[in-house]
Image (spheres, grey):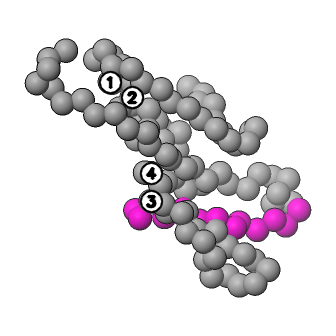
Amino acid sequence: MSSSKKCTESIKVVVRIRPLNTKEIEEGHKVVTTANEVRRTIETFDLASSEQASKTFSFDAVFSDKSTQKLVYDVCAAPVVQSVLQGYNGTIFCYGQTGAGKVCYS
């Protein structure tokens, strides 16, 4: 690798909101988070008090419950894979509730 090529390292935190599952819908659960993909924020709502956002969190990227696996891959994983193919180290760490959609099926 050329020393003239600038290499930067960073940790990026990305959030993907999952949709309610069938059981949650049948039990009447309400959505308490919304994703603003443009502003890269997640807003939480306290349904007991009001419908207004109670807390807002910012991230490097945010995906709504409508986001596809391909979009998440293209934005999050593809750049890491490309760097690895160029000889750099890369790690993708996925954390979340079991059944929340961390596994990519092709």
Mark 4–mark 3 Cα distance, whole angstroms, equals 5 Å
Q: Nearer the viewer, residue 2 or 22?
A: 2
The answer to whether one can see residue 37 in this image is no
Sequence-wise first label, 1 or 3: 3
* Residue beneath disc 2: 80
Mark 4 or mark 1, which is nearer the start of the sequence?
4
Q: Earlier in the sequence, mark 4 or mark 3?
A: 3
Residue at disc 4, secondary structure: strand
Q: Quadrant location of residue 55? A: bottom right
94 relative to 40, above or below = above
Residue bearing the label numbered 3: 40
- Residue at image point 81% right, 65% down: 29
The residue that label 1 is drawn on is: 83
Disc 4 to disc 2, C-alpha distance: 15 Å
Real-space Cα distance between discs 1 and 4? 19 Å
Badges 2 and 1: C-beta atoms under 8 Å apart? Answer: yes
Residue at figure coordinates x 61%, y 53% from the top left: 17
Which amino acid does the dot numbered 1 rest on? Answer: Ser
Q: Secondary structure at mark 3?
A: loop
**The quadrant where residue 75 appears:** top left
Magenta residues?
27-39
- In x, y percent, where is residue 41? 49, 63
Q: Is residue 48 above or below residue 16?
A: below
**At x 42% / y 24%, what residue is drawn?**
90
Q: Amino acid at mark 3?
A: Arg
Sequence-wise, the earlier of marks 4 and 2 is: 4
